[in-house]
Amino acid sequence: MSKIIELKRVNKWFDKFQVLKDIDLEVSPQEKIVICGPSGSGKSTLIRCINRLEEHQEGNIIVDGTELSESTKNIERIRAEVGMVFQQFNLFPHLSILDNCSLAPIWVKKLPKKTAEEVAMNNLKRVQIEDQALKFPGQLSGGQQQRAAIARALCMEPKIMLFDEPTSALDPEMIKEVLDVMVDLARGGMTMIVVTHEMGFAKEVADYMIFMDEGKIVERAKTKDFFEKPKSERTKLFLSQIL
Amino acid sequence: MNLIAKPSKKNIKTYLPIGVVLVSFSLLDVFINAFISYNILGFLPSQVSYFSPLILGFIGLYLIRIDFSGFSSLDNLNKNINSSNFNAVLSLITLFILIKSIPPLLNWFVLEANFLGNSKEDCTGDGACWVFIRVWFNRFMYGLYPDAEQWRINTAFIMLFIIVGISFFTSEKLKKYFILFLVFVFPFLGIKLISGGSFGLEYVESAAWGGLSLTFIISAFAILFCFPIGVFLALGRRSSLPAIKYISIGFIELWRGVPLITVLFMSAVMFPMFLPDGTFIDKLIRVLIAITLFEAAYMAEVVRGGLQALPKGQYEAAKSLGMGYWKMNALIILPQALKLVIPGIANTLLALVKDTPLIFVVGLMELAGMIGLAKTNPKWLGMAMEGYVFAGLVFWVICYAMSRYSQNLEKKLRTER
């Protein structure tokens, strides 16, 4: 099966500090991958390289057949195909939830306003906040804001969804509502790469687990194997601390 | 030691009336003194009578400073002007100064002022000579613009008010077209109407323009152009392209570092020397360009403040949705950044309006300039006070209106909870 994301020997430095070391990663369409690891291990940087919010300095990143390089045209096209959900939601506070969702489809995909708003409402229904459509982000709870952010990304009809610690900024009772939406999305066949510490979620949806430490991929394994018989000592230690 | 019990709810029945009487008496004393120059307590030694209103008022305020008195108006009064002995003294002094300053101002502005007449000799009172303003009013409004052609200025401004008025009451969709017309078509239409030279209108050279209408014309054009230029400079200064970045920085720092009066002088005197022979740019246009670029540099720094205040996540979210540089800035970044810096923008624009009188250095006379001219007229010597008070009032009205508008805009655009 052809791969939708390919990373080959990707290296990245922040000044002199190397954050990513020889990362190789392949993702097939509809695969769900969960990346975990201690803080500072480079997990967020890795997925931010996939839609080039961060630039890599060595190696190749190929997303949906297009190599990421300096060409801004390619980057904008790939970003439109890759949805991203942030830890801090990053909704646009000056726009209503509906406008948050319909803005990019109107201006980037050039959909007519009416169609874009229909798409937006459908996605808001999907994350079950259609009744909040006309409110502003500041009027919503954290869990609702994150679901709105997921809907906003879905409105671009992306082929791949990246999640950067989507539940880390949420109160405990709101985590579940966001995870439920993500599980639903996974069941719908979306290709997903998720950076998270929610191991229950990982066990439920992930095809593969990746464990990162100090900028390297330490272990990559099928979810069941990863939790039941991790190979590396570092992984065992990490799992013993968070499970 | 408990000769006088602390004011509290227990003794409110005796303390409150005594306190109110004392405070009222002290205010009455100052009031009578200010308005009819009679000192009720004149029988006391002079130092004592001088300070007696303050002392009596202070004791009165102390007596009525009762916590949780049960009267909400008394509680409010205590909270706002009488929260401690020190604040009580400050409040009294402020009130006394206010009361004392009413009669002289009233006398100068109205009671002893002269309104009727045609020359300086008609001003017989001790107060202001408003005859000066009345006689010169036409010049203060239109400068040296020929009387017979003034209807053109009037028409331009009346048209402006009508269009603005209509655009306030139309639907959002039509409003867009009105604003586009106001920004891109009307200014040039208006200028053509005022300057003339075609459509059978007599040409009026810009040196004859002046007065308040010139203040408006210069302010309006400078505001219209300095705002977009400032925004582009602010974006340029944060650009990742070195050439654009350093050009923007150089431009901003150059213009910010030079006094406006120098810039205006250069535009009028030095700039024409660099032009090829035979080319001529109207003085008013040169001045307009100078003011616009000068204020744009300030505007750029105000806008940059707003850009910097936005969290990085807003840029990332916009990018992650596939927006390019211009879409990101136009749809996500600038609407938020500009909203944040409305007070700063209003500040810059107010300063711009109040900087317009400086164009006198190149011989253009707007409102303050015309007043400066009129007060040196041999028949009207000694009228500087009336003239500049009038100019001050007019500028205050303009600037206060702008300030209120910016505050309303801030309120309207507030979407945070």
Image (cartoon, grey):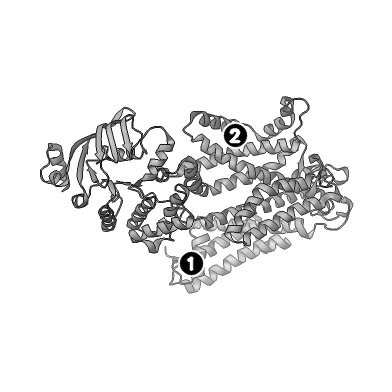
Residue A26 makes an appearance in the image: yes
What residue is pinned by disc 2? B256
Whole-percent x and y of residue B365? Answer: 77, 42
- Nearest to viewer (mark 2 / mark 1): 2
Question: What chain is tagged by disc 2?
Answer: B
Residue B137 makes an appearance in the image: no
Q: Between residues B215 and B373, which one lies in front from this camera angle? A: B215
What residue is pinned by disc 1? B75
Q: Is B15 left, or right, of B166 in this rendering?
A: left
Q: Is residue B298 above or below residue B8?
A: above
Whole-percent x and y of residue B118? Answer: 88, 54
The residue type indicated by label 2 comes to Arg
- The extreme left residue here reads A229
Q: Earlier in the sequence, mark 2 or mark 1?
A: 1
Whole-percent x and y of residue B364? Answer: 77, 39
- Asked if labels 1 and 2 touch by Cβ distance under 8 angstroms, the answer is no
Whole-percent x and y of residue A71? Answer: 42, 33
Tell me the quarter of the image containing the N terminus of chain A.
top left
The residue type indicated by label 1 comes to Asp
